[in-house]
Image: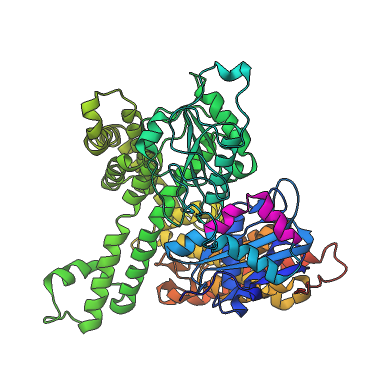
Amino acid sequence: MAAPIITAELITLDADLGTTKRDVIAALAERLAAAGRAGDAVALRDAALARESQSATGLPGGIAIPHCKSAAVTSASLGFARLNPKVDFGAPDGPADLVFLIAAPEGGGAEHMKVLSTLARSLVRPEFVAALRGAATTEEVLALIDGVLTPQSTESPRPDPSISAASPAAGSTGPQPDSGPTRSPGTAAPSAETKDRPQPRGIVAVTACPTGIAHTYMAADSLVAAGERAGITVHVETQGSSGSTALDPEIIATASAVVFATDVGVRGRERFAGKPVVESGVKRAINEPDVMIGEALRAAADPAASRVSGSPGETSSAASSSGSLGWGTRLRQILLTGVSYMIPFVAAGGLLIALGFLFGGYEIADNAKTIVLDNSLTALPDGGLSTYIGAVLFQLGSLAFSFLVPALAGYIAYAIADRPGLAPGFTAGAVAVFVGAGFLGGLVGGLIAGFAALWISKLAVPQWARGLMPVVVIPLFASLTVGMLMFIVLGKPLAAVTNGLTDWLNGLSGTSVIVLGVILGLMMCFDLGGPVNKAAYSFAAAGLSVNDPASLRIMAAVMAAGMVPPLAMALATVLRPRLFTMAERENGKAAWLLGASFISEGAIPFAAADPLRVIPAMMAGGAVTGALVMAGGTTLSAPHGGIFVFFAIGHIGWFLLALLAGTLTAAACVTAAKTIGRTAAPTPAVPVTV
């Protein structure tokens, strides 16, 4: 039998768990680990803080729901704390006193996800929240939560936590299938003034957050409840971790407008083509559901309102529409989508190439293909089995690495036009490689392919041809468009720019090399895994070539600088522990391994808590390391792995010296910065359990 989601030992009442959300999350994570729910409290805390860095989990009404999926979680679990004093979790109306830490195992079963989402949805019910505040004992709180998660059979059946089609909000009567104007019980009848007006037929919505555990379902219930208050039926499709039941096409067809409350892309967006649309992040639907429903109703009555494009994947055309995403934000999302899908090809391919060098030597690059094709285990080449294994690993890595530019272009186009953009995007990337335009060509080609597919999807076609559009027409003509442009117009100029950049890099010497190292180091440490960090990393990884010494030096500078922040924070917590809270000191222990593995995100919890002191200090250390690596001629033929790919590092002694210098610089700077204005060390809070 599966362990219960929450037990009495996971509940803390009227406790002082610290003054920051990091302290509270750390204390709850430790409770889960002590109860055997997580193998590593630090890893669980870091996963929750990483989710917190994407968007704050504080909600109106003094509630916070930090949550995450983590491999450290052994059993889907719920930790609860009623805080005194309250702690700020980023809610618009002030700090929170009720905090739930929702911890789900990586790849956890759908049933666990549904149970956790049920709890999250119950938090939009005022009576449930009031009961939690009024409970006198741990047992009362446990009974309240158990009553939500596992209702007694004598109660009315509770709807499935995945709201889709006509599923109502938890604890409400909810809307029934749409059949014209519908009013839920308890909703005031339309006034005489509005009775004779044409009433909207209903609204459909899609909610989704990055982890799909809590905000997805709370936003859904909030929108349904707001619809009830407005006398409108709202059907919501939740695209969360517990799965998604698609809205009935008939309900979509009869809806007057659509609300997209998502922090990620909407799956199956093309189903809503032509509908008036209101878009926002998922938290706005929790904080302002009535406002969003009002906007949707106005959009339904406005012929000029922004509408969902006929192309899957496009945002609304009018950015001025309330709640719509701006094109600056949208472009950043598009480019980061391409980079995020590209990185696995880079990491896997680059590490396989590095392993090939380990087994077969660097000369394996010249004859790996011949060895793999012409020899077998029964006819080993010179050097025996080791050389043969090296050739196979190098060839595997080279093939994987060759997808770098096509994957970048393909998924940039995918982010713009969804699946119909994949074929023209990958084609654009292949053309970029063919003409020598490289990474820059893939970037430009992916954008052209995506927008070409988007434009073609808007063309009015007969009903009989619509089924052919996403499968044949859009990929064919978008591929033709981008291919012709790349071959005839853009290919040679982009190749010239790429070759010029390569020649410039190869020609750098002296001060110029050091300046480049400083710039790369600053970029790697500016946002610790964010867009600027990813831009520097992508620049290095995309240009990596074992036959190009300049690219190997750039890769070494980027990786060494990216290792500095976690190592520096880990060192600072050891040198001056009194400047850091207990939670930060625990986080520093994990940061040693994260830094050594080239995971810059290991410093995010420190930067999130004290950005003005931490980030400049990390940038100083990164600049020192980047400059020294470039000045010393250190090379790296693997795009990831940190110190664990030591065999792929040229001049490893200088690499380690540069890394040490940057780490010491950053640690010294952050220590000095934290000392300024402080007369005493922070005293860690002592949890009080009732």
Q: How many marks?
A: 0
Instruction: Please state if 474 lies on the left or on the right of 241 as rendered.
Output: left
Where 455 falls versus 622 (above or below)? above
Magenta residues: mostly which secondary structure?
helix
Q: Position of residue 244 (x, y in %)?
A: 41, 50
Please provide percent x and percent y for residue 95.
75, 54
Whether residue 588 appears in this view of the structure is no
Residue 199 picture location, percent across and down: 51, 22
Using the image as rendered, state which of residue 401 and residue 171 is in the foreground: 171
Residue 164 seen in this snapshot: yes
Please indicate whether residue 98 sits to the left or right of residue 563 in the image: right
Which residue is drawn at the image coordinates 42% and 35% (left, top)? 314
Q: What stretch of residues is rendered in magenta?
A: 117-134
Indicate the quadrant containing the C terminus: top left, top right, bottom left or bottom right. Answer: bottom right
Q: In the picture, residue 253 is in which quadrant?
A: top left
Whether residue 121 appears in magenta in the rendering, the answer is: yes
Query: What quarter of the picture does the N terminus occupy?
Result: bottom left
The image shows residue 387, relative to residue 436, as above or below, that is: below
Residue located at (43% from left, 48% from top)? 337
**Residue 645, position as x, y percentages in the image:** 43, 74
Residue 87 belongs to magenta span: no
| Residue 29 sits above or below residue 211 on the image | below
